[in-house]
Amino acid sequence: MAKPGELAGRLGTVHGNLSRPLAMLLDLGFIQQELPFGESHRSSKRVIYTLADPALSFYYGTYLPSRERWPLLSGKEKGALIHQHASRQWEYYCRRVHKGSSRYWEGSTELGLVAFQAESKKLLVAECKWQDLNPAEEKWLLERLRLRFAQTRLATGHRDADFRLFSTKDLPRLSRREE
């Protein structure tokens, strides 16, 4: 994930020089553009670009940064890196299954999944965790999610929201929803 300014800095150029290459990569489907929930493509400057393909995302986001030391990493360390990648992919999957959902970020606060639910007229605010959670962990994560949501400008316009946690146990149900 990278903001346009970060990409320009890494490449040693100005942001304006990236508009054509980014547009081409978007058209070809190599990258995708993410905006915070509720933001318009026309007016928002708060955009993040991510690699669209999970395999490319793994290679460039997980393997390549640690390739020099990859042979020296223990199985546990490699497993942790792979788990991080799988967690990001799980979050993307959850958003894809919930049509119209996206991430929301504001300052240092990030919400993994936000969607407007037309039937209830409420926001769905969810945390996506690629792990098995016990009831105490679920309760703690949901409480933290509520607190993070309350700190955002999004909360002022949507006082009533449904808070959910999607973990590995939700995979069968979410996969049926996608069909």
Image (cartoon, rainbow, N blue to C red):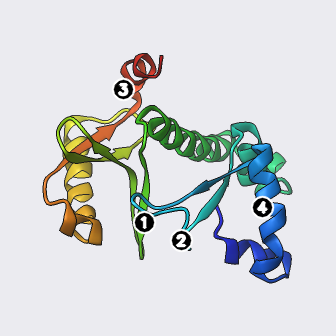
> With 70 as the anchor, is 161 left or right in this view?
left
Residue at the spot of label 1: 105
Q: Is residue 48 above or below residue 4?
A: above
Q: Position of residue 32 (x, y in %)?
A: 66, 51
- Residue plotted at (51% across, 35% down): 93
Q: CA distance from mark 1 to mark 3?
A: 24 Å
Q: Residue placed farthest to the front in the image?
A: 42
Task: Report the amino acid beneath label 3.
Answer: Asp
Which part of the image, by quadrant, shows the N terminus? bottom right
102 vs 16, nearest the viewer: 16
- Residue plotted at (74% across, 71% down): 7
Give whichever of discs 1 and 2 has the lower sequence position: 2
Task: Report the amino acid beneath label 1.
Answer: Trp
- Comparing marks 4 and 1, which lies closer to the viewer? 4
- Comparing marks 1 and 3, which lies closer to the viewer? 1
Residue at the spot of label 3: 170
Instruction: Report crowding for label 3: few under 14, some 14 to 19, many 20 or more residues within 10 A (C-alpha).
Output: some
106 vs 108, nearest the viewer: 106
Q: Evaluate whether residue 152 shows in this view.
A: no
- Comparing marks 3 and 4, which lies closer to the viewer? 4
Give whichever of discs 2 and 3 has the lower sequence position: 2
Give whichever of discs 1 and 3 has the lower sequence position: 1
Residue at the spot of label 4: 22
Task: Report the amino acid beneath label 2.
Answer: Arg
> With 86 as the anchor, is 19 left or right in this view?
right
Q: Identify the element where label 1 is drawn.
A: strand
